[in-house]
Amino acid sequence: MNTLSFDSKRCERIRQQLDSYLSNELLVETASEVVRHLESCEACSRDLESRMRVRDVLQRAVANRPMPESMRANILRTLRDSQRRSLTRVAVKRWALGFAAAAVVLFGVFAAEWLNLRHGEQLIASILKLGVSDHVICAIQGHNYPEVANPPDEIREKLGARYAPLLQVVQQRLPGFELLEGHICSIPGSDRKYVHFITRGHGTILSVILTERNGAALPRDKLLLSADSSGLGIYQDHLSGMEIAGFESGQYFAFVVSDLNQKELLQLARGLAPALNETLHTTARLLPPNATTKWAKLG
Ligand SMILES: [Zn+2]
Ligand SMILES: [Zn+2]
């Protein structure tokens, strides 16, 4: 980089005004002083360019956050556009370093954003996978449900006092679905237990699954949410050929899983979530965690 004459006090004063200058907040006299200085000071011009770029990036970041895939294209477009604009004003060489620096800033901002979202997505997928595994292994491959629905009393007994009240919720909140079976199950090779309701409707099998969170939590990033149902954030994914929607309810993760289309499944999850959440909370109040052997009915 060329060494530049750098009247530090003057430059410092100008730089303090650059953000106001960019926001058109300066008085005319002050603004023209800034302009005059920028014409003769390469360092401050570069500073201004990079501030402009960061603003641009932040604005685009807000507009584009839900679509990480598009970020790269946006960055490149932003760079190309501003390069074209500036090239008409100044020599290539003079600005090349400024662009390189701006590019680093741009990629830094987007990369952090992108990594955040990617990390959130991975966390969601790893949690939702729990529900998909149980549905696929217990309901689909294991076919652990009868053709004719098990009597509710039998299901209640298998579920135990803590989870029996959920039977009614599942029966009532999944329009077009018949509850065939409810039990507490685990998948081979895992200590994890699942409260598992198996229903049939819309030409397929759908599971409603609860499992203890054990301190794990879904990300809080609203951009990763698929829907909101009475304040319950619902996350959705497509995993192992299944659509799954999941949300947190107290000490549990709750999942709705089937091979229905995404929209239909999400709608069912939204309809079920508030009632399921409320019932779980009520039961938790009546039966504190250590009051009963929670998984006593595991066969
Ligand atoms: Zn300067
Ligand atoms: Zn099961």
Image (cartoon, rainbow, N blue to C red):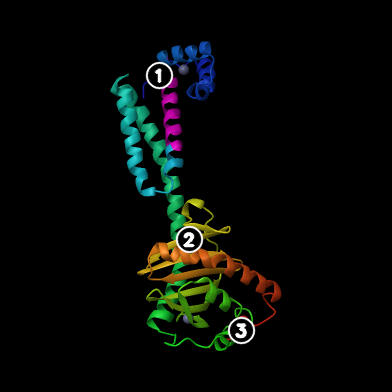
Question: Where does the image place residue 98, in percent across and percent down from the top left?
Answer: 37, 28
Mark 3 vs mark 1: in front: 3
The residue type indicated by label 2 comes to Tyr
**Which quadrant of the structure image shows residue 40?**
top left
In primary-sequence order, the first of circles 1 and 2 is 1
Residue 144 horizontal/vertical position (percent):
44, 85
Is label 3 within 8 A of ligand 2 (CB to nearest ligand atom)?
no
Residue in front for this viewpoint, 133 or 38: 133
Identify the residue at the far front of this view: 176
Disc 1, ligand 1: is the CB inside 8 Å?
A: yes
The segment highlighted magenta reads: 41-59
Q: Mark 3 highlights which residue? A: 160
Q: Is residue 249 left or right of residue 146?
A: right
Q: Alpha carbon of mark 1 to alpha carbon of mark 2: how far?
A: 49 Å
Residue at position x 62%, y 68% from top? 278
Q: Residues within 10 Å of mark 2 (few under 14, many from 20)?
A: many
Query: Is residue 252 placed above or below 87 in the rendered structure?
Result: below
Q: Is residue 250 left or right of residue 69?
A: right
Residue 71 is tagged as none
Q: What x and y, as percent, mark residue 238?
A: 38, 64
* Sequence-earlier tag: 3 or 1: 1
| Residue 42, disc | 1
Query: Mark 3: few, some, or many residues within 10 Å (few <14, many ≥20)?
Result: some
Amino acid residing under circle 3: Gly
x, y (%) of residue 291? 70, 79
Q: CA distance from mark 3 to mark 1?
A: 75 Å
Q: What whole-number distance in Å separates the C-alpha atoms at marks 3 and 2?
A: 28 Å
Q: Nearer the viewer, residue 105 or 128?
A: 128
Judge depth for marks 1 and 2 and give the one in front. 2
The residue under label 2 is: 235
Can you tell which quarter of the image residue 121 is in?
bottom left
